[in-house]
Image (cartoon, rainbow, N blue to C red):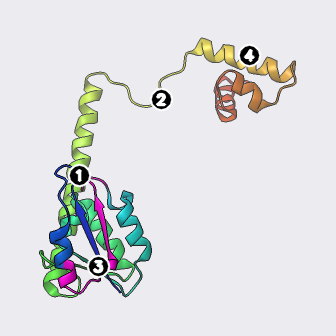
Amino acid sequence: MKYGYTRTSTKDKQDDDLQRRALIADGVSAKLIFADQVSGSKEARTRSGWANLDARLCGGDELVVWRIDRIGRSMIDVITTVNGLVHRGVEVRSLSDGIGPSTREGRLMLNLMATFAEYERELIQERVQAGVDAAKARGVKFGRPTPDAEKVALNLRTVKHLIDLEGLGVVDAARTVGWSKATYYRHRSAAGVS
């Protein structure tokens, strides 16, 4: 089965007429064209039109898009989505870009995109790590804040009292101080209380 997908941005309220006409001219039935009007920065899998299309695509199907960037703006999202489809046996073809797994040039373009996507991932990781390092240098603490020892001790005594003397279960007793059962046992264990 031959399916089509269009995406237009919400910012400029453009319509997908140009994309639709190109897909129909390529032999895609108008009934099998799925569309989204949403920013390309949203991952493909989070878009309703894409989700409906993806649920129908099976091995042996072909997905035609006007340009490969209609699948997503981020190269990582595009290549991840395309690779997932190709692994499922769905052929992906872009009319304007000449990208598709059925030709040498198309496979070359997909491989180049995969290389650039990996490069983009590494750049993102480097920027994130640089930001974390700079924050640590400024004294920013990461992770769960250290609990107030006095408050933890008071809560432990309260929960123990409710269990031992009031007959409450651990879940209900812990809930009275705003803890879950797991939080109670974690603090109890850290305090060395049995």
Using the numbered discs, state the Cα–Cα distance from disc 2 to disc 3 in whole angstroms: 53 Å
| Disc 1 packing (10 Å; few <14; some 14–19; many ≥20) | few
Q: Which mark is residue 144?
A: 2
Q: Is residue 150 magenta?
A: no
Q: Contact, CB < 8 Å: mark 4 with mark 3?
A: no
State the image coordinates of residue 152 (x, y, percent, origin top left): 63, 18
Q: Return the disc, 1 or 2, that comes first in the chain's sequence.
A: 1
Query: Distance from label 1 to label 4 (Cα)?
Result: 56 Å
| Residue 10 tag number | 1
**Classed neighbour count for the residue bearing mark 3: other residues with Cα under 10 Å, few (<14), some (14–19), many (≥20):** few
Q: CA distance from mark 3 to mark 1?
A: 22 Å
Type of the residue with mark 4: Arg
At mark 3, the secondary structure is helix
Stretch of the chain drawn in magenta? 23-42
Secondary structure at badge 2 equals loop
Residue drawn at (64%, 24%) of the image: 178
Of 175 and 118, the residue lying toward us:
175
Badge 1 amino acid = Thr
At label 3, which amino acid type do we have?
Ala
Q: In x, y percent, where is residue 113?
A: 18, 68
Left or right: 129, with 84 as reference point: left
